[in-house]
Image (spheres, rainbow, N blue to C red):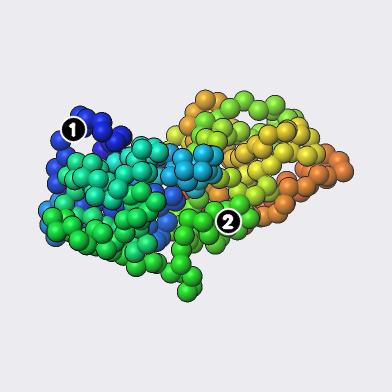
Amino acid sequence: MKIVHFELNSRLTIEFKPLVAAIGFFDGLHRGHQELVKETLKQAQLKQLVPALITFSPSPQSVLLKQPEKLLTTVEEKAAIAKKLGIEVLIVLRFTPELSQLEPNLFYEKVIKTLNVKHLVCGEDFRFGYKGSGNVDTLRAIEEIGLSVIQDFKYINERISSTIIKKQVEAGSMNVANNLLGYSYELNGFVMHGRKKGRTIGFPTLNLLIEDSKIVPKDGVYIGISIIMGKKYVSTINIGHNPTINTVKHKSIESFVHNYSEDTYGQKVTFYILERIRDEEKFSSVTELIEQMDNDIKVTEEYFTKEQRRAFDIEII
């Protein structure tokens, strides 16, 4: 997949083939967004166009409100999901105050037309241009471009939105969040050195350093999967401050990887967060902590039946 970073008034260094493009911020690229992708792929096949996704970075909210926004997906994660879905070109449009102040007709001329988009796909509530003054009716009035407007996608009679999914992740309700996303929520980053206290009690862990913008699930212990060098491993993941031993001020993300003992320092890894086991607790003794950790690992192992391992493409030991 080709990834293109585009800024208003910048000169394109490549010439785009005619595109059909879905447009939006697409945080999470959840099941609702995936309906737009399906329509994009359909129109691309019908009209012999290249399927593309136009997104923004940084988030419009962070620019307009002048404060950082916690997100479900980084640009890199969004690109990986889009590629899996069949998108061939990801256009990352730099969101600036100048861009936000464009009148809708200028947004069309300077962005959509410049990118050689012949057919646009958007949600029914899509707004663009100064103070959101442009909408689907504005786009319908532009005769030179095709348009597909996708209605809100609902799950159990409720509209799926990034805001709702964020709340579920922050609450640790990973079953619900993953159902709404249509895939397992993931944390990507590099393994960094911890204090190695886990090794002293028989539970060495991988400590993950992630981007500051990424939403981290509620503190607690989770059933998960660690992807190391392309291979998937059953894992018990702790998110929090380690209140019993090795207490840390900043939130840590640590994975005890079952049946794994290699050195992974500095490597890029992925943690899938599947289901919450319990709250993080402060135990009265290290012995009590070890007993609870043994139980957490047992719960994780019991979760991964042979069918589950096959579903996640994990080697059956």
Q: Residue furthest right?
A: 284
Q: CA distance from mark 1 to mark 2?
A: 39 Å
Regarding residue 193, the answer to whether it shows in the image is yes
* Residue 151 in the image: above or below residue 201: below
**What x and y, as percent, mark residue 35?**
33, 62
Kind of element beneath mark 2:
helix
Q: Residue furthest bottom?
A: 157
Q: Which of pointers 1 and 2 lies earlier in the amino acid sequence? A: 1
Q: Residue at x 37, y 62 (%)?
A: 125
Q: Position of residue 161 (x, y in %)?
A: 46, 60
Q: Is residue 308 left or right of residue 275?
A: left
Q: Label 2 crowding class (10 Å Cα cut-off): few <14, some 14-19, many 20+?
A: some
Q: Position of residue 74 (x, y in %)?
A: 45, 41
Identity of the amino acid at label 2? Lys
Relative to residue 158, is residue 73 depicted above or below? above
Q: Which residue is drawn at the image coordinates 76% and 32% (left, top)? A: 246
Q: Residues within 10 Å of mark 1 (few under 14, many from 20)?
A: few
Which of the pair 114/54 is nearer the observer? Answer: 114
Q: As rendered, which of 207 and 264 lies closer to the eye?
A: 207
Numbered label attached to residue 167: 2
The residue that appears at 34% across and 64% down in the rendered structure is: 124
